[in-house]
Amino acid sequence: MSGRNTFLTPHRGLAIALLSLFCLTLFILRPQEPAVFFLWLISLSLLVIRFRFEKTDAWLLVESALWIIVAVFIDKAFLLAYPLAMLLIYHGRHYALALPFLLWLVFAFLDFEVLGAAFFVSVSGILLKEWKAAQETAQKRVDTHREQIHGFEREREYLLANQEEVSRMSALSERDRIAQQLHDDLGHELTGALLALRAFEVKEPESSKNDSFRSLQGRLEASLAKLRETVENTKTEEELGFERFRDILQNFDYCPLEQTRRGDIEAITPMHWHLLASVVKEALTNVQKHSRASKVEIDLYVDASIVRLLVKNDGIREQEGKDGTGLRFMRRRLEGVGGTLSIHADYHFTIVCVIPLRLEGTI
């Protein structure tokens, strides 16, 4: 947007039109008495004050009535009500279009200078009002585009974060698989070899005096102990998923949080924990950003076919009925695996997430 367009706005155009109207009014009044010129200066001063402090329609109409009353005693003083009529027209009060012509008919019929001022007020007010409406429409389009761009950026951030999380979960799954394979295959083989060696020692007692035999036995025992320690120190994916969910709840300190768990929690898989953690994190973030909640309730329920997570707060959401980017993105992710996410805003703001135990597709 150029500097010239930025400078020339409907509001400034209104100021220029009003100043021109005051000059025209001064020309028509041609004040011979100081009192008339003084009233004109008062009207101009009131206009400046009016631009600084917004006045209501009722105030403008009362002020117009006062100038009309003054016109009973001072000829053509009703012209000082014309700027107020222009202001009302500018703000979309079309009934004010009749005001300048009505005053002309009552006080100055056949005075074409006053008629010209009435046309100036009406035409200028309408043109400025349409200009303001067009600019507001254009600004709304710009704001909508900016909001869409911001939404796209947020979705991109969520997608990148989700991609990183999926990569992390894949790495944990692979680590868990390797640990399980070490335990099931190599562990059993080493245990079998050590048992066979001990059985041979029982059968051949003299073999225990052999240095090579004792060295081999010691190495097998040390390898088996090291393998056992490695497997035990490798956290399973399930444990890590649950811990992430638990840590999100423990780190929430905005307001008191009550949580309940029902059903077979052990049936929740790593991918379920991943989805549940994402939902509860987004829900608690929204509580901190958009509500004045005094309490949050979280209910996790598992039955034979679904996992249901309910997050409820008693705060007042600033943008009720309008889902945020995070919740919209979360809903799409859940729908991709056969789940749902619903929002209920009444006395409480409630988010209900339902995920089937048997997931569809992949995250």
Image: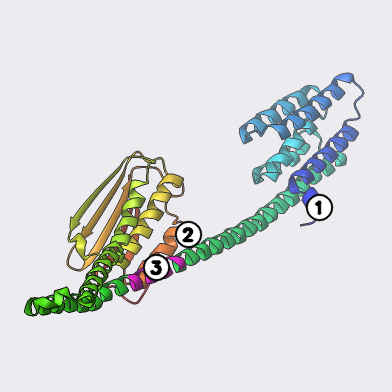
Disc ID at residue 3: 1
Q: Mark 2 to mark 1: distance in Å?
A: 34 Å
Q: What residue did someone put label 3 on?
A: 333
Q: Are marks 3 and 1 in contact (CB under 8 Å)?
A: no
- Mark 3 falls on what kind of element? helix
- Which secondary structure class fits the magenta region best? helix
Which quadrant, please, contains the N terminus? bottom right
Q: Which residues are magenta?
A: 164-175
> Per the image, is 22 magenta?
no
Q: Counting residues from the N terminus, which is met first, the one under dot 2 or under dot 1?
A: 1
Q: Counting residues from the N terminus, which is met first, the one under dot 2 or under dot 3?
A: 2
Instruction: Report the front residue among 168 and 318.
Output: 168
Q: Please tell me whether mark 3 or mark 1 is closer to you in this view.
A: 3
Q: Mark 3 to mark 1: distance in Å?
A: 45 Å
Identify residue type, mark 1: Gly
What is the quadrant of residue 174 in the picture? bottom left
Q: What residue did someone put label 2 on?
A: 325
Instruction: Count neighbours of disc 3 (C-alpha within 10 A) and say few if under 14, some if 14 to 19, many if 20 or more.
Output: some
